[in-house]
């Protein structure tokens, strides 16, 4: 079940602690649709791209801020752990944003940082 979070404005809906748009993630979409073939395809590609050993069962996520299933990385994500550890839903609430903890993501996915910045205004 997708997250019903409070982080909405006219620019973007925040669905993760870091600012990634979970609703656009292929793992999230495959979980929502229940498409086993799509999950298998994602598992093969992500295993190759990220030097992992994933199966279709691993491709199961309802979004970072949801109470539903999370992709295995979400449970290990240092950004999510940091925000939640401080009692925040996202980096948007943190006075230290941006910081070394989220730098790796924002250099690779600038849109995630932009989403957080939009929620800080």
Image (cartoon, rainbow, N blue to C red):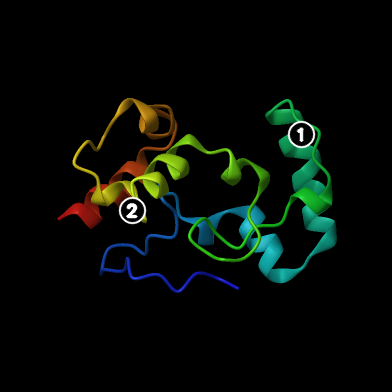
In which image quadrant can residue 2 be found? bottom right
- Of marks 2 and 1, which one's residue comes earlier in the chain? 1
Query: Residue 96 sits in which quadrant?
Result: top left
Residue pointed to by mark 2:
88
| Residue located 42% across and 37% down the image | 109
Residue at image coords 24%, 56%: 119
Is residue 91 toward the left or the right of residue 25 in the image? left
The outermost residue toward the left is: 121
Q: Is residue 20 above or below residue 11?
A: above
Give the Cα separation between the discs numbered 2 and 1: 31 Å
Q: How many marks?
A: 2
Q: Which of the two residues, 34 or 64, is positioned nearer the viewer here?
A: 64
Which secondary structure, mark 1?
helix
Identify the residue shown where x is 43% and y is 33%: 105
Image position of 80 with respect to 26: above or below? above
Q: Which residue is mark 1?
A: 47
């Amino acid at each position: 079940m997708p997250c019903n979070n409070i982080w909405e404005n006219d620019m973007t809906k925040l669905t993760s602690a870091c600012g990634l748009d979970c609703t656009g993630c292929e793992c999230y979409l495959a979980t929502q649709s229940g498409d086993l073939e799509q999950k298998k395809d994602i598992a093969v590609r992500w295993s190759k791209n990220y030097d992992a050993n994933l199966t279709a069962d691993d491709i199961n996520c309802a979004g970072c801020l949801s109470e539903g299933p999370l992709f295995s990385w979400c449970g290990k994500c240092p950004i999510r752990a940091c925000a939640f550890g401080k009692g925040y839903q996202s980096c948007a609430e943190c006075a230290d944003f941006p910081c070394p903890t989220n730098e790796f993501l924002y250099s690779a996915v600038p849109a995630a940082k932009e989403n957080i910045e939009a929620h800080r205004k």
